[in-house]
Amino acid sequence: MEAASLSKLRVLPQVGITTYWGAVVEPEKLTVRDIHSNKRTRIQAKQGPGTDSWFRYDQSDFDTCINRVLKALPSAETWVNQNLR
């Protein structure tokens, strides 16, 4: 079993979206899969692409990783307040 894991917290637009092919997805039916991966904002352990920017449970002990995630959460809250409220 893979030790690394991807954690997701989703905050979706309250107005729904229109996909690139023109389909309207109402907010109550919207899922994270309806939003292109390039348009999703992620909290990362460090800037950059690939697995090096992930929070990795397999490269340090679990508590250290969780503490890094918790320290990064305020940046997610700031983004939500600036972009979705």
Image (tube, rainbow, N blue to C red):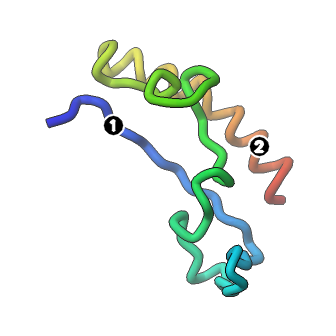
Give the residue furthest to the front.
Answer: 21
Badge 2: residue crowd in 10 Å (few <14, some 14–19, many ≥20):
some
Q: Horizontally, is 85 left or right of 33 in the view?
A: right
Q: Across the whole image, how many numbered discs are drawn on residues?
A: 2
| Residue 67 location (% of width, % of height) | 47, 21
Q: Secondary structure at mark 2?
A: helix
Q: Which amino acid lies under the numbered mark 1 shown in the image of this protein?
A: Ser
**Identity of the residue drawn at 44% across and 28% down:** 51
Q: Mark 2 or mark 1, which has the lower sequence index?
A: 1
Q: Is residue 14 above or below residue 21?
A: above
In the picture of the structure, the residue carrying the numbered disc 2 is 79
Q: Secondary structure at mark 1?
A: loop
Give the residue furthest to the left.
Answer: 1
**Identity of the residue drawn at 28% across and 21% down:** 58
Alpha carbon of mark 2 to alpha carbon of mark 1: how far? 23 Å
**Identity of the residue drawn at 85% across and 48% down:** 82
| Residue 78 location (% of width, % of height) | 78, 39
**In what quadrant of the picture does the C terminus appear?**
bottom right
In the picture of the structure, the residue carrying the numbered disc 1 is 5
